Amino acid sequence: MRIARNGDRTLEQAVEKMSPFERKNLLLSYAREDEKKSAATLLDAGRGNPNWIAARARESFFLFGRFAMDEARRSMRVPGVDIAGMPKAAGAAVRFQQFLDAHLDDAAAPFLRDCLSYAESQGFDLDEFVQEWTEGITGCEYPVPERILKYTQEIVRRYLLAELCGGKEPSDAVHGATADAAGHTFDLFATEGGTAAMCYLFYCLKSNFLIHEGDTMALMTPIFTPYIEIPELNDYDLEVVNVNASTMRSDGTHGWQYPQEELEKLADPNVRLLCLVNPSNPPSYAMSEESRAVLVKIVREKNPNLMIVTDDVYGTFVPGYRSLFADLPYNTASIYSFSKYFGATGWRLAVAAVAKKNIFDDSIAALSDDEKKTLNSRYSSLGDDIPSIRFIDRMVADSRLVALNGTAGLSTPQQVQMSMFALQELMDRGHLYKTKMLELVRDRFDCLWESLDLKQDPDPLRADYYSIIDLDQWSRKLYGDDFADWLEKNYHSLDFVFRLAKDTGIVVMDGGGFDAPSWSIRVSLANLQIDDYQRIGEYVRQLLAEYADVWKNAE
């Protein structure tokens, strides 16, 4: 690598307004050029697409598909033409057991048998349950209910209780909880990935006059870039207050927690909406119990009408994780995606969870008469009693511009796979998958930081899905304040990631695009082999040392 003074910053200035994900694509093109010119192998530690998949739930999906086709042909068979019918419910569970008996040599058969046993233990109607899967996997019916299939909701609800709520139904200390006959206190809307849930939530909030142009919302930063960009769109045009994870440890490194003075920003009743990713992206830290307690106290005592959207996708990477949804269910909508933990980004599987008693419904009920009249007109095609339509059901309708509500819903094959992923975890009594998953990302984290010669102590709040390397902090530690100040003065903050891609074939993302420190980089620990992280760390060290050589020679 050869570094000269960065006199021309035209490229960096041209791309700094782009989304960091768009910049990543540009970096990939540079890295591919380097791969052609040298023996270096391209290493993409940019986008967080995991390089693992949950195999058993997928094998079971495909084996169950064979049973579903047997059921379809049992219902209708047209001689000479490959046309089958609709799977039937009557006797389906017995026939499924017989199918499994005939496929004992298939590795997925024991899992599917356990699924049936689990369904029985939960009091499910087994014929109904099996038919939901046979109809679902063949995709022969519209999703009904549109919001989520009956048993998909039952299974995924139990999964979220275990993973996000400590195994207990969320109950608000102030507002209590409304439960159905089965004791369930929240409902789910199955969506095409977490990003779709984000879109539907924001759109429904705006459509129902819960947020207006010019309103103030808060973001707990650093944060996944779309949460930064969506409020700026002219569709929403929201004012944003950042609540910064700015705590520092005694050794001068980032703690990535939220000090009280930052959390106190949420006490302002003008802040109507709060969005957070927890554990955070990119720092990859769960909110501490202390920070969570302060936030809960502020909401209850100072800003009880605050609406909260928590993105809990990385929660499964932190043992004993607890979502804000568990502590503030009245105020909070939770988004959970299956994409990362189960290696299922291509499946597009997520749910939005909303408590049966919630601020969204109560705020709609408190709207002005003119606003209610507008909403009565908007949702008139859904029935006569518009005020009784809950926020989560309005989300479903809004996801299809209301008029197409009858064809709303996540595709049924996706919902079957979602159920199987959730069941894989629910039935893993020894937590073998979770133990191995946490070990896998933790080992990659350790390898990266050891290669930087900056070994980190274990932290039970760290998810280890990403890691932020603060180059400014590191350069001050290695070479002193004068060097760090010189680096910032003479080089654009994007210079480092561009040089790394061009000269080594390594792609990382700049932290500034996530409202992390501008001279920081985000390394995904999800999508490369462990030895690759040693190479990344070594090249990052080497590149910083070469900047230091330029500085020394310039003195």
Image: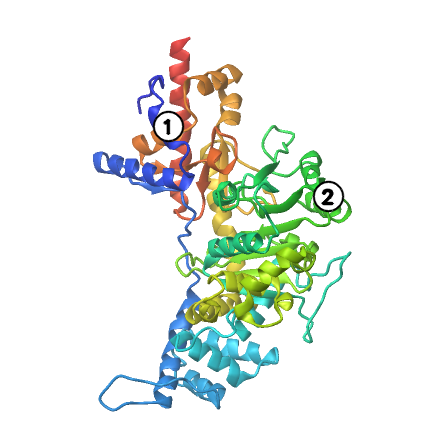
Please state which amino acid type lies under the numbered disc 2.
Val
The type of residue carrying mark 1 is: Glu
Residue at left offset 50%, top offset 25%: 472
Q: Relative to 527, is 169 above or below?
A: below
Q: Residue sitting at 39 percent across and 10 percent down?
A: 554
Residue 292 placement, left or right of 524: right
How many numbered circles does the render carry? 2
Q: Residue furthest top?
A: 555
Circle nearer the N terminus (2, 1): 1
**Percent coordinates x, y for residue 382 in the rendering:** 54, 70
Q: Are marks 2 and 1 in contact (CB under 8 Å)?
A: no
Q: Quadrant of the N terminus?
A: top left
Q: Position of residue 328 (x, y in %)?
A: 69, 54
The image position of residue 332, as x and y in percent, is 64, 54
Q: Residues within 10 Å of mark 2 (few under 14, many from 20)?
A: some
What color scheme is it? rainbow
Left or right for 408, reference 209 = left
Residue 168: image location, x then y, percent: 69, 63
Instruction: Quickly name the residue at label 2.
Output: 294
Quadrant containing the C terminus in the rendered view: top left
Q: Secondary structure at mark 2?
A: helix
Residue name at image x 30 percent, y 30 percent: 503
* Residue bearing mark 1: 12
Residue 423 position (above or below residue 507): below
Camera-side residue of 412 and 359: 359
Examine the rendered structure and indicate whether residue 218 appears above or below residue 56: above
Residue 167 visible, this orientation: yes
For residue 204, above or below residue 10: below
Q: Which mark is residue 533?
A: none
What is the crowding at mark 1: few (fewer than 14 residues within 10 Å), some, or many (at least 20)? some
Name the side, left or right, on which 516 lies relative to 504: right
Instruction: For marks 2 and 1, give the one nearer the viewer.
Output: 1
